[in-house]
Image (cartoon, grey):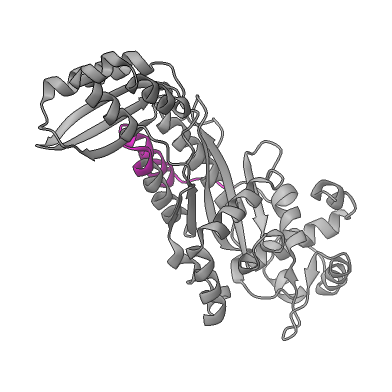
Amino acid sequence: MTAVRLTAELTDRQREVLQAVVEHYIATAEPVGSRSLTRANRGIDVSPATVRNTMADLEDLGYLSAPHSSAGRIPTALAFRVFVEQLAQRGRISPKERELITTVTSHADRDIRQVLAEAGRILATVSKHASLVLLPSIEEVVFSDIEFLPVRDRTILCVFVAKSGLVQHRTIDVDFPVEREELRRMSNYLKSLLDGQRLVDVRDTILTAMRDERAQADEVMRRALALGERSLTVDRAPIVLIEGERALFEQPEFADITRMRRILRAFEEKTMLLRLLDASIAQPQAAAQSDTHVLFGADAPVNEFKDLAVVMASYATEDGPVGTLGVVGPIRMDYSRVIPLVELTAGTVARSLSGKEPAEDGQPGSQSD
């Protein structure tokens, strides 16, 4: 049953109280009582008794639960789902946060992994939660350019550029003396051979060319093909970058050492993280106009993440590689603030990898003070 249908079954007062309970719990991390809710003056202009009765109704409907040791109530995963999809107001991104996130575009000439690692660090900093970045598979990118540059006597820097503007670097040790003119001839030969091909097809083209008698007889061509094979080999194993795990354990929910160890072990297991990311993107969008997806712990495919929530968004370049990035935090994270941050970061990464300028204010994810 969708959140839209569920909220349609709630009265205006129930929606009002539910939103107030979730917001109060996000702010305090404490079970919420009717008296504390009315004292907090969260737009509720009714008596504590009325609030108490409404909260009891919400508990019966599955939106609130009662911890054993407290008279207060805490929101369930269902309540947070409704809050994210229907009730939460989108927060504003401060000019300072926006400036920090958009610095990712200043690294557009760097290797894709460096750009994404920097994006993950920045997202962890501004969100104050752990960040996850899934590097894209680049099998479908289209070859545009390759350049070999001398680094040391027998070390070469390979710079690969895709049609979209995506850049990937790789340092390679060779068994012959490095000469700039010879490297230029190698680069030109590979450009003419591979232009317009998908990276997934490049290796077959190179292997076919290696069997050609002319290539076998020409030392420069032979070396160029060998370098091309080494530098353009696609790494098919998914890579997940993690930043800011320490921020998780500064939250009161994770003060328990057993719970903390369980989560740390899960972060060390790449298979668990990949399952979590796949499940996150499979979730409904956070809102009708959003490309962001939210996974709550109860829906996680891995039990170790049951106390967490994940906010993820996809990013892509024009010619195909797609990855995901986002944050992991307590279920009571401030979604109205985190979702716009994740959206802006994903959009900025996509533009950076495509060599474009940062989005102007007013475009998706560009809220500012």
Q: Main secondary structure of the magenta part?
A: helix
Above/below status of 209 relative to 330: above
Judge whether residue 104 can be spotted in this image: yes
The residue depicted at 32 percent of the width and 36 percent of the height is 107
Measured as percent of width and height from the top left, residue 141 is found at 46, 27
The magenta stretch spans which residues?
A: 91-114
Q: Is residue 18 left or right of residue 349?
A: right
In the image, 241 versus 290, the foreground residue is: 241
The residue depicted at 76 percent of the width and 82 percent of the height is 71
In the image, 70 versus 206, the foreground residue is: 206
Q: Is residue 187 left or right of residue 3?
A: left
* Count of numbered badges drawn on the protein: 0
Q: Is residue 84 left or right of residue 168?
A: right
In the image, 144 versus 68, the foreground residue is: 144
The residue depicted at 41 percent of the width and 55 percent of the height is 125
Measured as percent of width and height from the top left, residue 221 is found at 24, 19
Q: Look at the image and say whether residue 99 sits in the magenta stretch.
A: yes
Measured as percent of width and height from the top left, residue 134 is found at 49, 47
Q: Look at the image and say whether residue 115 sits in the magenta stretch.
A: no
Measured as percent of width and height from the top left, residue 338 is found at 55, 52
Residue 157: name its quadrant: top left
